Image (cartoon, grey):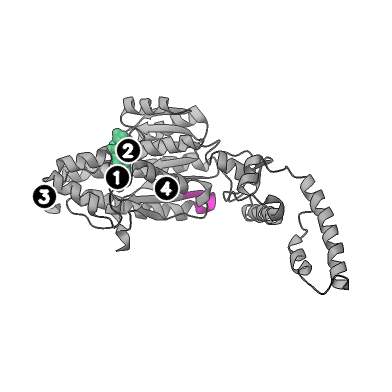
Amino acid sequence: MGTVDRGVWPPLLAVREGPFSAVVLLAKGLKLLGGLLDSRLYSRRPRPSGRFAVSCATWRSRRTSCWRRSISSRARCTRTSGEPACVAPGTRTEFVSLCNLAGDRNGVSLMSAEIAGRFDGRVAFVTGGASGLGRAAAERFAHEGARVVVADINRGRAEAIAVSLPEAVAVEVDTSDASAVDHAFEAALEAFGQIDVVFNNAGIVGPQLPLHETTERAWREVMAVDADGAFHVLRSGIKAMLGRRGGAIVNTASSSGLAGKPNITPYSFAKAGLVGLTRAAAIEYAERGIRVNAIAPTAVMTELVADHIARAPDPDAMRRLLETQTPMPGMPTPEEIAAVVAFLASDDACWITGHTLPIDGGFHAR
Ligand SMILES: NC(=O)c1ccc[n+]([C@@H]2O[C@H](COP(=O)([O-])OP(=O)(O)OC[C@H]3O[C@@H](n4cnc5c(N)ncnc54)[C@H](O)[C@@H]3O)[C@@H](O)[C@H]2O)c1
């Protein structure tokens, strides 16, 4: 039934040789037959929900292409032997594409599911979730239907965020401690049974010092969180996802990892390393359905940046610098960064892996 290629009808019907020509009669007959097949085909399939109908507004006229897209997305998902390569984490059916164009999810249109919440049925684990970018991302994931694990070194604030979300738990963790990270993931799995998204985001800037004055201690302090911590979370997140056959990880790098900035050498080093770690992990786990990407934001006014400004030798000059360094004036908000994180973590980005996406108002275009 699914092999009928209704795409042949339109060219044939387009032939215009007069009302009584044999071609037109043949075409009309075929159209009738096609219509009968079509109605049989669609009568067996669930009708699109109201939301689907809105997003696929001309559904009746476009139904052929909608159906074809669902066939091709299934084909892509099942092309590898064994486990489907492209299984949406947290969904109930086997052959659901991560590319949720218009396939079915147990009879529910994926397009309607996407509109209802891109993270419905999914669990997002957010480190540094108690403040700034992590907090905004936790709220965004929750808003789009996810159950959220707010993981942070600051327990009180993590709990406060968690209780403000519809379905969330707080987990206290110092990401620089490998076994604490393992325990945090265990606690998350105990709470929700699965992890589909990891926002590997906890980080610090460290002291502002010229390279030749950077102490061993300052270097280690930044590495412990921004390099070791990011590695620990990535490793535990991947382990948790391997059991689920897929997921999406977004690492928080920085524009300071893509371009040199003065007096934050350890930070730049760690964030540049995270760009490489993102690529390596993406390649290693692509076949197992785990996508790994990173964001590289420019300065965003969070506590981290407010503190960075306050500790600068000339805070006003530092503020001015951060506000004027990008071709687009001003700074992005944490919510604007969270929207990009949600995109990369969602099925909308199903063919994106291994990339570090600058969110920089054109900074790196110069
Ligand atoms: N704000 C920016 O301009 C900017 C730009 C580029 C990249 N980043 C990166 O974004 C990430 C988040 O920064 P932010 O601006 O939201 O900062 P923030 O200070 O507002 O939030 C960071 C959160 O991480 C937590 N945290 C710190 N160390 C931790 C640890 N060892 N274990 C667990 N949690 C820990 C803090 O308690 C805090 O809740 C960082 O990795 C930072 O380097 C920030």
Which label is found at residue 257? none
> Residue 257 or 119: which is nearer the viewer?
119
Query: Which amino acid lies under the numbered mark 2 shown in the image of this protein?
Result: Gly
215 left or right, relative to 297: left
The numbered mark, 4 or 2, whose residue comes first in the sequence reads: 2
**Residue 203 location (% of width, % of height):** 29, 41
**Label 2, residues with CA under 10 Å away: few <14, some 14-19, many ≥20:** many
Q: Secondary structure at mark 2?
A: helix
Query: Which amino acid lies under the numbered mark 3 shown in the image of this protein?
Result: Glu
- C-alpha distance separating marks 3 and 1: 27 Å
Residue at x 40%, y 35% (from the top left corner): 182
Q: Is mark 1 within 8 Å of ligand 1?
A: yes
> Residue 214 or 258: which is nearer the viewer?
258
Which label is found at residue 132? 2
Circle 3 residue: 213
Circle 4 residue: 340
Query: Which amino acid lies under the numbered mark 1 shown in the image of this protein?
Result: Val
Q: Is mark 2 within 8 Å of ligand 1?
A: yes
The numbered mark, 1 or 4, whose residue comes first in the sequence reads: 1
Q: Which residues are magenta?
A: 286-291
Q: Say if mark 1 contacts mark 2, CB within 8 Å.
A: yes
